[in-house]
Amino acid sequence: MIKELAVTILIDNRSEDPRFLAEHGLSLCIQADDRRILFDAGQSDTFFYNAEKLNIELRSIDTLVLSHGHYDHTGGVGRMLEINPALEVYCHPGVFILRYSRRPDGSMKPIGLSKATADALHRCVDTIHWISRPIWLTEDIGITGPIPRRTVFEDTGGAFFLDPEAERPDPVEDDCAMWFITGRGVTVITGCCHSGLVNTIEQVRSITGALPGIAIIGGFHLLHASMERIEATCDYLHSAGVGKIVPCHCTGEAAVECMEQRFGGDMVERGKAGAIVGCRE
């Protein structure tokens, strides 16, 4: 089991400390004993600035995991590969798909990889580890691969499409998460959780077994969710015995407030750029 786990939020939508920059996106630096993993790469390379302020040497990162192929999780990939061309990259082959979201005014916005990111990944395409099923990086660390959609109340959480005419819905099938097994249980790391938070935790449980002391950190994509879905999600978290919740990025204020009301401030810690969430055995 992992003896020491530290998750540093390099990029989030919010920052309460003027030393750290925020942007719409997510990037987490994860140290699990002697493994150093970058989970997602924000909307830009702004996470480099925050890493410097936190005295994190990004050249020492050995693994890059991309949760899915949206621009706000992949923007710093090119620069990361420039400084560390030997980086082990893990992602689903669907990251290259052209994708769009429909704005409130009906216009369409491209939300897939930027050209710079796509070019950087194509340059190392022969060495990328493609995630089409659950894999274990070590006996205590893994990536879910595509997550089965089992619940009746969870969806991708927005108006996402595979074409600019909005005729083909995008189920974001490349959505992946990670897990880390510690002596206190399992920590689940999510990017945007387009598969649904309940589906994601259930997938981790089906792979690792019903471990106690679950912690969840990342974006939960409940920003546009109905209160019925938010409440059903909170009901599940309560029944699952989740012990720590760190909502980031796309979780949404209504969902965070509902979690705080249900579980209290000791259990719910709002994500923000520069924050460090740790677990030591």
Image (tube, helix red, strand yellow):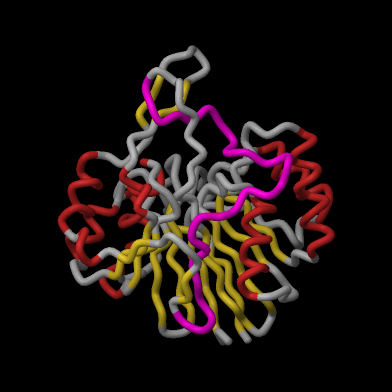
Magenta stretch: includes residue 250:
no
Q: Quadrant of residue 158?
A: top right
Instruction: Characterize the magenta stretch by its predominant secondary structure.
Output: loop
Question: What residue is drawn where x is 19% and y is 64%?
Answer: 83
Instruction: Give the percent coordinates (x, y) of residue 33.
Output: 47, 84
Was residue 160 drawn as part of the magenta stretch in this picture? yes
* Residue 62 on image: x %, y %: 32, 74
Residue 38, relative to residue 11: is it above or below? below
Bounds of the magenta span?
Answer: 138-164
Residue name at image x 68 percent, y 34 percent: 225
Q: Is residue 275 above or below residue 112?
A: below
Circle count: 0
Position of residue 42 relative to residue 160, above or below, is below
Towards the viewer: 8 or 68: 68
Q: Residue furthest top?
A: 105
Q: Nearer the viewer, residue 48 or 217?
A: 217
Q: Position of residue 280 (x, y in %)?
A: 60, 82
User: Residue sitting at 40 percent across and 18 percent down?
Assistant: 165
Residue 82 placement (x, y as % from top left): 17, 60
Residue 29 position by quadrant: bottom left
Residue at image coords 32%, 55%: 49
- Compared across the picture, whether 218 is left or right of 230 comes to left
- Left or right of 203, for residue 4: left
User: Is residue 105 found left or right of 153 in the rendered image?
Assistant: left
Looking at the rendered image, the quarter that the N terminus falls into is bottom right
Q: Nearer the viewer, residue 186 or 156?
A: 156
